[in-house]
Image (cartoon, helix red, strand yellow):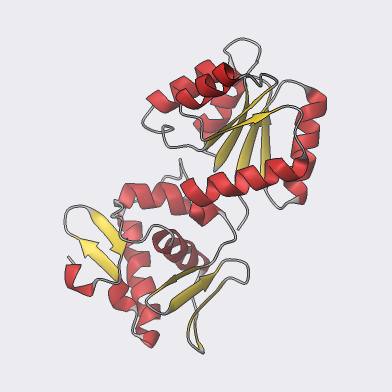
Amino acid sequence: MTASVLVVEDEPAIQELIAVNLTRAGHRVRRAVSAEEAQREINLTLPDLILLDWMLPGISGIEWARRLRGDERTRDLPIIMLTARGDEGSRVAGLETGADDYITKPFSPRELIARIKAVLRRRSPHATEDGASIAGLHLDPQTRRVSAGSVEVKLGPTEFRLLHFLMTHAERVHSRAQLLDQVWGDHVFVEERTVDVHIRRLRAALEKTGHDGLIQTVRGNGYRISAKLQDAG
């Protein structure tokens, strides 16, 4: 599963180099040359990760990162800071804004891809190609297959994304609104009860392998996936 990466960089050559290498690695790239333009981009839809240059025209990258961390909608967005400043004080300042990582220019494309993968694995595991397993149920995002032993579970695209997100965030409770944002996409306006419909479809598909009980309703809060069946709400 590819990630949507917003590249905020005002140097055209560097922006192009990053975009080409991210696209080659399978990611979907969006671009901005300033914090103001980047803000307009995320007002439309949230990316999976932001690559943010420290020195930008207008609002600096580090100041914009502080604003993102102060906003409920964007406070959990993975951010990697890009900068020519390699001193310890600058690295500390970048991380103290809430950035997840800090890369000093010049950097190799391979290092950048590896850092992105590491941050996504920590912060947004559903945006990586890593598989997930729980209680004998296995999901492979590369082949888009779900199976238990030799039995394959057939899922529609929405149910697959829903299961992938829940499996990569096992034991955590997610509200309907959170699931809509993460699975359907930020700023997609559909009824919250739509989640209930797809949860029912997902449970029905998992009945074949006896894993429907993994999908649990937590009354008044939302849904989770858990192998601890005695904790079901």
Residue 145 sits in quarter: bottom right
Residue 42 in the image: above or below residue 120? above
Q: Position of residue 179 (x, y in %)?
A: 37, 52
The outermost residue toward the bottom is 150
Would you say 191 lies left or right of 17 here?
left
Relative depth, front residue between 221 and 173: 173
Relative depth, front residue between 191 and 72: 72
Residue at (46% x, 42% y) in the render: 186
Residue 86 sits in quarter: top right
Q: Where is residue 184 in the image (x, y as percent from the top left)?
A: 46, 52
Give the tally of numbered discs.
0
The outermost residue toward the right is 13
Quadrant location of the C terminus in the rendered image: bottom left
Q: Where is residue 58 in the image (x, y as percent from the top left)?
A: 61, 9
Instruction: Tell me if I can see residue 100 in this picture.
Output: yes
The outermost residue toward the front is 88
Residue 208 sits in quarter: bottom left
Would you say 151 lies left or right of 27 here?
left
Instruction: Tell me if I can see residue 190 in this picture.
Output: no
Quadrant location of the N terminus in the rendered image: bottom right
